[in-house]
Image (tube, rainbow, N blue to C red):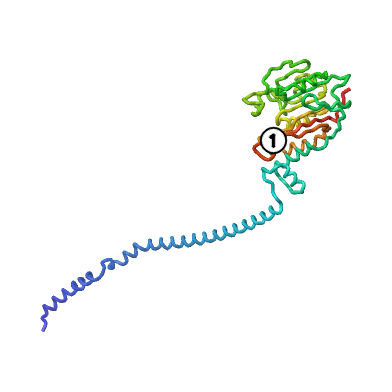
Amino acid sequence: MIYPRSIYFLLIAFPFFVIFLFFRYQSPFDLLPHVENETMLPKISMIQQMNKEKESMLQQIAKERESMLQQIAKEKESMLQQLKMKQKEPTVSQNIGVNDLCTLIDKGIAVDSWWKYVCLIERSIDKPVGYNCKDAKNMGNWKICFDEKYSPIRPDKPCLVYSFGIAGDFTFDEAMAKKGCEVYSFDPSMGLEDYTHSKNVYFKNIGLSHVDDDNFSPRFDIYVKKPQIWKTRTLRSVMKMLKHEKRVIDVLKFDIELAEWKVMMNIIQDGMLPKIRQLLTEWHIFPRGPKRDELKTFYEMHRDLPSHGLETFYRRGHTRRHSNILKFNSQAESCFVNVNFTDPK
């Protein structure tokens, strides 16, 4: 028989016993599931968002990769087609010899290179003479035509010679002076003041150019080995300076190391050819000049010289080296008569 007091004791002790068992066999964190959920939900949401963004980025990368592969495939196909075309139409390297380039031009192969214009300039220079001079003579180291129509020596007219580029060699100038010509010799590279060199030979410390310049700085070469400042003038300005505006230049000679290209163009543009009976020059193409993008213009100028009345009676190509681009050299002499020249009355 159980007494009421014992039952009362059990009723009081039982809840404590149940609480003891609960804490003994269950984690205390499980008691507050709502607290854990409130803490973890933002993190879970952030992770889910990051996963979505990651998936979106991977999809975008995959699309870009596919697009890139397609573009590469197109470019590859285009390059292959270009290579096939190049195999059909051989190209010319910058270091190929001009003879080979001319051979390619002969075969009708299109060549777009500065070498092309060097070749065409040389061909233009090497064409058969346009005027057959019956009485061509060496005057020092230059040819002069003494045919009656173009001879600088005329019984009723004074002879005037301009000689640009001396380098200490007056043989041409003196030979013309002995023929009775009044000779003006010009060369600022010699570093001399104006003086009378010999009978009828007058030295001037001025250079010929396509512009008037009191402070011209020449490039270094075999004639200029230290910094110099020159005074240069156009042909028109030289004639004005010497008070020769109303005279004729019977022989104009210039050997001026690359400046000849633009000087010739200036002479044509200034309308000076009607004042010139004979013209002698040396053409130069060196590794550092003229500028390669100017060669086409210079070729066209040289090609068109006969249309301005200049016909060669003598020409000679020399010192032509094409195999080594660093030592490239092309030089030639041309002697012209002006078939359009008319003696002033």
Q: Would you say 250 lies left or right of 62 here? A: right
How far from the left and from the top, in percent, is residue 309?
84, 32
How far from the left and from the top, in percent, is residue 270?
78, 29
Relative height, residue 163 to residue 32 (above, below): above
Q: Would you say 235 lies left or right of 344 here? A: left
Q: Would you say 278 lies left or right of 331 here? A: right
Relative height, residue 19 to residue 324 (above, below): below
User: Circle 1 is placed at which residue position?
Assistant: 329
Which of the 4 quarters of the picture holds residue 166? top right
Q: Amino acid at mark 1?
A: Asn
Relative height, residue 241 to residue 78 (above, below): above
Relative height, residue 58 to residue 103 (above, below): below
**Relative to the observer, which residue lies in front, 146 or 194?**
146
- Does the rendering let one see residue 276? no
Quadrant assignment for the C terminus: top right
**Relative to the observer, which residue lies in front, 76 or 221?**
221
How far from the left and from the top, in percent, is residue 313?
83, 32
Classify 10 Å Cα crowding around label 1: few (below 14), some (14-19), many (20 and above): some
Quadrant assignment for the N terminus: bottom left
